[in-house]
Each structure stands twice: as structure tokens, then as C-alpha cells.
Image (spheres, rainbow, N blue to C red):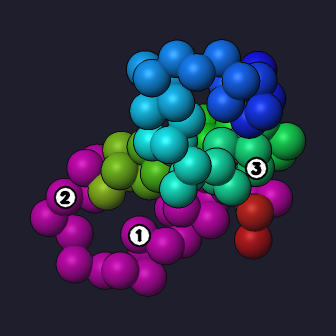
Amino acid sequence: MSGRSCLKSGLKPLLAFARKLLPDLRGILASAKYPLNISVPESVNNRIKVIKRMAYGYRDTEYFFLKIRHVFPAKW
């Protein structure tokens, strides 16, 4: 339903809903045009957390980053 159709309908709840969406309109349209999938960065973060838990107690940060590079070789 377009903005004109909404105005022509004269339905107060529909007009109120449209007014509430107006500030976020750019973001809504951008997410419809460019859908992003966040699963890849989330899985990378989760894997790094697992490595960190497994390395609990080690003080060598260089080894920690080496383990991360080992798990994600194509990313570096």
C-alpha cells in the first residue's frame, strides 16, 4: 500500500502506523533492497570464543592469535 493509498483510506490506525514507520523508512527500504546475512561473522566470533575458552590459563597471546589464524587460514 503506497503513502497515497494510506492517506486516501482515512483509517486512523493505518495512518498512525505509517507515521511510526516514517523515521525508519530508509533502513527498512535498505534492508529490503540489500538483505544481509550475519551468520558468517557470528560463526567466526563463536569459533574464536571456543578457542579462547580452550586456551584459558595460557598467557601467550601470540599463540592465541596463531590458533585463530590456523582455524581461519583463508581470512588472513
Per the image, the residue denoted by label 2 is 56
Q: SS class of the residue under badge 3? A: helix
Which quarter of the image is occupied by the N terminus? Answer: top right
Q: Is residue 47 visible?
A: no
Per the image, the residue denoted by label 3 is 30
* Segment tinted magenta in the rendering: 53-74
Mark 1 vs mark 3: in front: 3
Circle 2 packing at 10 Å, graded few (<14), some (14-19), many (20+), is few
Q: SS class of the residue under badge 1? A: helix
Q: Is 64 contained in the magenta span? A: yes
Q: Is residue 48 visible?
A: yes
Locate residue 66, reporting x and y percent.
54, 71
Per the image, the residue denoted by label 1 is 64
Q: SS class of the residue under badge 2? A: loop
Q: Amino acid at mark 3?
A: Ala
Q: Which mark is residue 49?
A: none
Locate residue 16, reporting x and y percent.
44, 33
Nearer the N terminus, badge 1 or badge 2? Answer: 2
